[in-house]
Image (tube, helix red, strand yellow):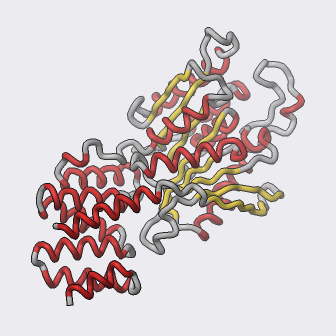
Amino acid sequence: MRASLILFILCTAIFSLYSQDLDAVKEDSLQSEVLNETRSFQLYLPPSYSKYKTSKHYPVIFVLDGERLFDVTRSQVHFLSQTAKTPEAIVVGISNTNRTRDFTPTSTTIGYSGEPDEGLNESGGAESFLDFLENELLPHLESSYRLNGYYLLIGHSFGGLLGAHALAQSSVMDAYVLIDPSMWWDNETVTSSLDAITLSDNPPRLYISSADSDKYSNEIEFMRSSQVNFQQKLTQLGYVPDSNLKTVIYDQDNHGTVPLRSILDGIEFIFQGYLVEGMAHRPSAEFIRSFDAFEERMGHDFPAMEELVTWLGLRKVKEESYQEGLPLLKMNADNYPDSWLVLYNLASTYEEMGEVKLAEEYYLKAQALAPNNPDLLEKLNNRE
């Protein structure tokens, strides 16, 4: 049991080390034929990305207004995932060139006040922007990175309007966080367009936030009522509040400050169920069933974080029984066959159980992945 305890401490240290890395950000750009311009974007890769070569694939969180919202989103994704509250994710922040053009679904010069606004002269390009996002940027990412096929779009204000339009157009997105969205646009045209869609049995998951309070502003009724109309239309189509649709009013935030809380709460809601509450005190079979159910609901692979399962599996081996810990360690080996430490932990556990042949099999698999690892070499030499 001493070896398992040592590895338990080792893996806890590794987990803490991962949580400190927030520098894996890339600056990139793509020449868009659809938009006839170069589009810049930032990309955040989770700490574990470089560790795995083939086994782990990641969801993508697209963030509109990337020049403002990318940093706050990636830091919150990093924190939530490294505490195992949500899965790790790749974050892509798309910078603006012509925000009004790209995020508005129809052409109109009538602004929020109901009066003509010359700043809206180029409005109505949302369809082209979605074309760029789905048919240029996404294929570029798919060819360059390990994606699991699950896509979340986060948009604020006009960006939230673009997200709502994408939903109405049956976009490839699996989920949306719409932050104080400008549903008032062009006589609530996006809400009206929902009449033409038919939702699947498992429609995109939605988090919608609203800002401001009557105490501070008498101008929110127009914005709020259009958001309520949109939400009501969604429930008529089959959305279930607090199940696949969450609406929240942040009455202590204004339109400019509301993204901070909305992004955090929205991401938590979208990935609700990834964290198994009270996992250390539940049977391993219940933990595994919970992850199976989460993946079924999400429609994509979301394996439990390696370090989390290692911690839980070795804890159960140490404190309860091999029968409780072994299924978790085997699940880890199935999910992460290119992690020498996962295979080593399973081999060590089999050795303690007296399963010599299985121990030898997994020690050799671990050695093939890390032939020069000093800890592994020492262990193998001591066994000879």
> Which is nearer the eye, 41 or 143?
41
Q: Would you say residue 192 is visible in this rendering?
A: no
> Which is nearer the eye, 82 or 118?
82
> Going by the picture, which residue comes out furthest to the bottom?
384
Q: Residue at x 43, y 48 (%)?
A: 86
Residue 270 location (% of width, % of height) = 46, 42
Q: Residue at x 19, y 71 (%)?
A: 349
Task: Tell me if residue 102 comes above or below residue 336 in the rendering.
Answer: above
Residue 97 location (% of width, % of height) = 81, 47
Residue 82 location (% of width, % of height) = 44, 52
Task: Tell me if residue 158 comes above or below residue 214 in the rendering.
Answer: below
Task: Tell me if residue 171 comes above or below residue 26 in the rendering.
Answer: above
Q: Quadrant of the C terminus?
A: bottom left
Q: Would you say residue 78 is visible in this rendering?
A: yes
**Snapshot quadrant of residue 371:** bottom left
Task: Tell me if residue 161 comes above or below residue 211 in the rendering.
Answer: below
Question: Is 166 situated left or right of 321 in this image?
Answer: right
Question: Is 131 situated left or right of 332 in this image?
Answer: right
Q: Residue at x 51, y 61 (%)?
A: 47
Q: Residue at x 34, y 53 (%)?
A: 296
Report the number of numbered marks: 0
Residue 87 location (% of width, % of height) = 43, 52
> Going by the picture, which residue comes out furthest to the right?
118
Q: Quadrant of the N terminus?
A: bottom left
**Snapshot quadrant of residue 245:** top left
